Image: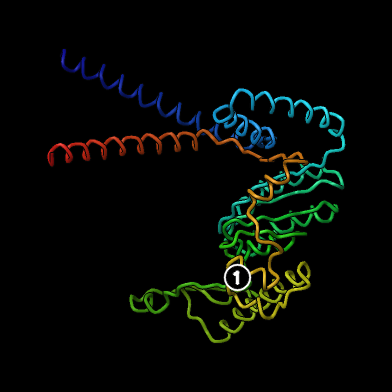
Amino acid sequence: MDFLFEYGLFFAKAVTVVAVVLIIISSLTSFSAKSRLNNRGELKVTHLNDSINKASQSLEESILSESEKKEVKKQRKAEKKKLKISKLYKKRIFLIDFKGDLRASAASQLREEVTAILGQARDDDEVVVRLESSGGMVHGYGFASSQLNRIKKKNIYLTICVDKVAASGGYMMACVANKILCAPFSFIGSIGVVAQLPNFNRLLKKHDVDIELHTAGSHKRTLTMFGENTQKDRDKFIDDLDNTHRLFKNFVSEHRPNVDINSIATGEVWLGTEAITKGLVDEILTSDEYLLDKTTDTDVYKVVYATPKTLSEKIGFATEASIDRLLKKWWSRIFSRDTNLSS
């Protein structure tokens, strides 16, 4: 009897613990979903001039003599007086970073950043976008390039800096700019359209699997992964690709009228030093060089629209970090043990 009593007590405790855990998980999931809906994120603005000046001053403290430091302080005081006078009329640069993926998922963040900037920008201000993307879905990058075009429509000067790659959809975005800068070995171009998909129809037939697909409209479906594709389907699919390519070429020609569109819209990619000869970019210059030079007489503000991570995302990142730390410890122990054995 004592055994049954203790077992029943243990079972009740176990059920209670499981129930509490399930309630907590349910509450956290609900809270995470609500926070995603209610919290739209926030705009973070960083004055890059201050960051650059702090780094420069830190270096000065290490390498200058006392007499040189005094001289630099005098110069700074004189410069501050001049800045106070010209502060209200100083030109501003708003800096945006765009790192694209296949779906151009950063376009929603770009939209918020552009909207915020256009609410404050003056006619003599400039927007600089550090762009990195090898392209992706047409509709996603079409939307992203439309966001950049909003800046030009407001007569705000737009500069695109490409330090690594702006190809395909990435170049669709870049060509909107008033000026395109790129690093010497960045990848530029790929003005073409590509699409591919596997077809499992013969494999399914081999295993006596039938696929039924019903459409209303002769071109509602062209190529399919599971049905039998006809030459008519292929012709229509290729026609759609050609039409998208034609629209892409027209878009580039509209924004870069001096390029020979037929010679560069072949899907090829060029390095920066070659791209400038094709008229795809305007100057070989990295974003660091351009911005550092501008900070002497321009206020540079980095604008980031940050969306807070949900609770589930935070838990995921924390778990990933914990696993990473454990793996590092494990590998370090193995390495140290092997070293001791060999010595």
Mark 1 highlights which residue? 190
Q: Residues within 10 Å of mark 1 (few under 14, many from 20)?
A: many
- Residue 210 is left or right of residue 267, and the answer is left
Identify the image quadrant of the N terminus.
top left
Nearest the viewer among 240 and 146 is 146
- Residue 336 is left or right of residue 83, and the answer is left
- Position of residue 264 relative to residue 169, above or below, is below
Locate residue 48, reporting x and y percent: 67, 37
Location of residue 243 by image quarter = bottom right
Report the amino acid beneath label 1: Ser
- Position of residue 339 relative to residue 178, above or below, is above
Locate residue 82, reporting x and y percent: 83, 31
- Position of residue 69 relative to residue 177, above or below, is above
Coloring scheme used: rainbow
Q: Residue at x 68, y 58 (%)?
A: 181
Identify the image quadrant of the C terminus.
top left
- Residue 18 is left or right of residue 272, and the answer is left
